[in-house]
Amino acid sequence: MPTLPPNPIVYYGLLAFCLLLGLGLMVLAWQRPRQRQRLGRMLAGAVATGALWLTAFPPLRHLPAAQAEAILLTDNYSPDTLRQLVHQLGAGTPVWAYGNVKLPAKAKPLASLLTLKEQRPALRRLHVLGRGVAAAELPTLGQLPLRLHPGAPFAGFRAAFWPAKLSLGEILKVEGSVTAPAGAGPAWVVLRAAGTGSDSVKLSTGSGAFRLRYQPKAAGLATYELLLRRPNQPIRTEPVPVEITMSALPAVLLLTATPSFEFKFLKNYLAEAHYPVALRTSVSRGLVQTDFVNQPALALDRLTPALLARYQVLIADAATLAALTAAETQALQTAVSAGRLGLITLAEAAPLPRAVLGRADFTVRARPAAPAALPALSWPDAPGEARAPLPAQLQSHPNLRPLITGPNRVLVAASRRVGLGFAVVSAVPETFRWALQGHAPVYASFWNQLLTAAVPPAAVAATWRIGSWPHVLQPLTLHLTAAFPTTPPTVAALAGGPAARLALRQDTRLPEWSTAQFWPGAAGWHQVRGPKPATHNFYVYPAAAWLGPELAERQQAVTQRTTAFTASPTAQITITEPWPASWFFGLFLLAAGYLWLEEKL
């Protein structure tokens, strides 16, 4: 039976009009002079009138459907999966389309997941087809269980990892994996920087893991590119944004008991790298020689708290530390333990002096006479082969972090946490020979390894953390670790545009944690300002960038949600809905077309 409209006047008025129209068409067909096709015209008139009535008020039909279940279509969904799911759940199961999806038959557009929750509060399970929804949007659905039905297998960059921020001089490492269908052929992954390919790797089977390297040449916000090339296929390009910072170089104090090439070359290297550096060399008893670069001169004859407060790293040989007075030793140990100073000790084949912090863990042992060939040294990211005489080595200890290793992985340089600071001991002598032999990158890398391990940790400040893979027009969660600010921070695109205020929500468990949501409207670099003086830069990817890692993130979020919220079994029910009005309107057009055409013939 047809559905009744809310206004009975419209209903009965249209019913009377259709009855009169049908009766009039049948009378005209019966009274026409030509007897041919009389019955056909009468039948066509009745069909046209009935189809017109049913177009306005279609009859109801009963369809099977899964009780309290629905289907949500997202980008890259499979039509075959949709047909199978509708057949399984029932033709009456509601279907919504979310996002940039072409609407199939019977699907309704959905502007927000919150709207779905409000319109269907009794839902017990939601079937999501395609790429799914962003992890930040899932809390909108409350405790509604989800079941993900992925689309076609993804081909391209499946995963990628690189640091969002680097100090100038550090190596950028981009790692990840590529997936491809069977028999896809070889592929090349290229890291493009400064307009040219800087590093590349060939994947013989078209898929697998890759690792690429590049050393940035200038500070600032850089956007490199990762290219995936396959024979007879278009090149896939993904952005690799990195913030290259120019951190303040620590001031270094060098102390040596005797003049040596080791400290002379080290002072020159640090000076050329723009470190503030001071060198104190003991010439004879009670007589010292000083040298200052990139800083003003001051008295270095005694180590006092005021003097040590001017430096972040102290590098000394064992003989100098052994000659310190009790007051100097106390000032040195206090500065290191408080996290204001890092200590690097150049050890000899003898026990360390008492001034070395963590001395009980740094056990120096003499090595047997070296063979004719100098032993090789190794450390992470060494730019070349490094060989040096090794008269001594360090004994391994659980509290030591290895920095430099020698033959058979013996420990020759290590660091240890001491209070809030760090102590480093190196048993590698005569590193200046690398600079003399033209191995300047090896020399710089070695000392950068020791200096980085010894620099005191930075003071705690307000920090921002951004959710992974932020995309344009998708919710992004920003995490702040700091005291709750009195003035709301703002975020804006660096390319231009208005700044948006962030509404922070303070964590009830840890007051120094706060979160805010932001919907970026444009791709590119953005900056968060506040609480003063903190700023944070982050990159928003275009909608079509890095779909592989985002797909994996969405699938993981749905899997965790499925584990947390389990749907109760649902029964098959029958729902009532009107027949499609387009069917009856098409029947009306056929009947009316027959009447018009028969009149002309």
Image (spheres, rainbow, N blue to C red):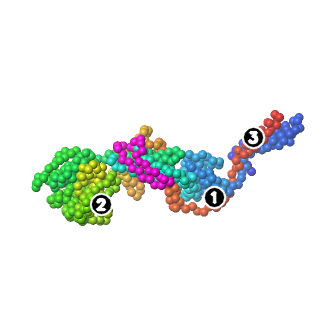
Q: Quadrant of residue 17?
A: top right
Query: Alpha carbon of mark 3 to alpha carbon of mark 1: how far?
Result: 38 Å
> Disc 1 on helix, strand or loop?
loop
- Which range is magenta? 194-223
Residue in the image at 77% along x and 44% along y: 50
Q: Is residue 326 magenta?
A: no
Q: Which quarter of the image is occupied by the C terminus?
A: top right
For the point 88% across and 36% down, the residue is: 34
Q: Could you tell which of marks 3 and 1 lies nearer the N-terminus?
A: 1
- Expressed as whole percent of the image width and height from the top left, the position of residue 21 reads 79, 39
Q: Is residue 252 left or right of residue 9?
A: left
Up/down of 357 relative to 20, above or below: below
Residues 524 and 561: in front is 524
Residue 209 falls inside the magenta stretch: yes
Q: Position of residue 271 (x, y in %)?
A: 24, 46
The type of residue carrying mark 3 is: Leu
Amino acid bearing label 1:
Gln
Q: Is residue 246 left or right of residue 549?
A: left
Residue under pointer 1: 67
> Which mark, by number, is residue 406?
2
Give the distance between the C-alpha atoms of the residues marked 1 and 2, in whole angstroms.
69 Å
Secondary structure found at label 2: loop
Which numbered disc flags the more N-terminal residue, 2 or 3? Answer: 2
Q: Name the residue under label 3.
A: 589
Label for residue 393?
Answer: none
Q: Is there any visible trace of residue 121 in the rendered image?
A: no
